[in-house]
Image (tube, rainbow, N blue to C red):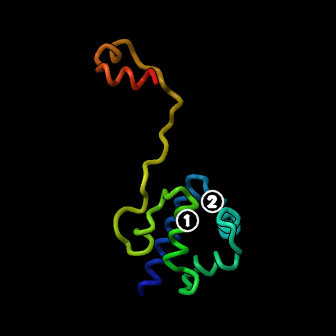
Amino acid sequence: MIIEERKKRIEDAINHLMAIGLIDSRTPSISIAQKMRRGKESISAAINGNERYLTWKFVKAFCATYSNIISADYIWNGIGEMINEKEPEDKGNTSISDESLMTLSREELVFLVK
């Protein structure tokens, strides 16, 4: 039962990473294998819940490969949230109105200038 839960959580993590464009959704096993520098067969075995491959060491390496966006503790134990970090916000609109500028503190102004 535990391995099935881990399998489901790693599938959820992979789906999230595909949704944000970090894993190729057409060939996820190959995409992960290339990024992790491992064989496609071992990646597929881990994703399919093979206990010899879906190990704590694999989960930590998988998460580290994708900058720990996904929590290894979440995949392994179901503890906490799946996503460790907020995803980057759209930085396209950096303008600020004159009215808003007048209400900013000195620290906020320094932050904006940097």
Could you tell me which residue is drawn at 40 percent across and 26 percent down? 111
In this rendering, position of residue 43 left or right of residue 96: right
In this rendering, position of residue 3 left or right of residue 43: left
Amino acid type shown at disc 1: Ile
In this rendering, position of residue 77 left or right of residue 7: left
Image position of 62 with respect to 19: above or below: below
Marks 2/1: CA–CA distance? 7 Å
Which quarter of the figure has residue 65?
A: bottom right
Q: Nearer the viewer, residue 61 or 95?
A: 61
- Place of residue 34 in the rendered image (x, y in percent of width and height, measured from the top left): 70, 64
Residue 90 in view of the camera: yes
- Place of residue 77 in the rendered image (x, y in percent of width and height, measured from the top left): 38, 75
Residue 26 in view of the camera: no
Image position of 106 with respect to 23: above or below: above
Q: Where does label 1 land, which residue?
A: 14
What kind of element bears circle 2?
loop
**Sequence order check, earlier mark of 2 and 1:** 1
What kind of element bears circle 1?
helix
Q: Nearer the viewer, residue 41 or 4?
A: 41
Image position of 100 with respect to 88: above or below: above
Could you tell me which residue is drawn at 56 percent across and 52 percent down? 20
Disc 2 + disc 1, Cβ < 8 Å: yes
Amino acid type shown at disc 2: Ile
- Place of residue 76 in the rendered image (x, y in percent of width and height, measured from the top left): 43, 74
Q: Nearer the viewer, residue 73 or 86?
A: 73
Q: Which circle marks residue 23 in the picture? A: 2
In this rendering, position of residue 28 left or right of residue 87: right
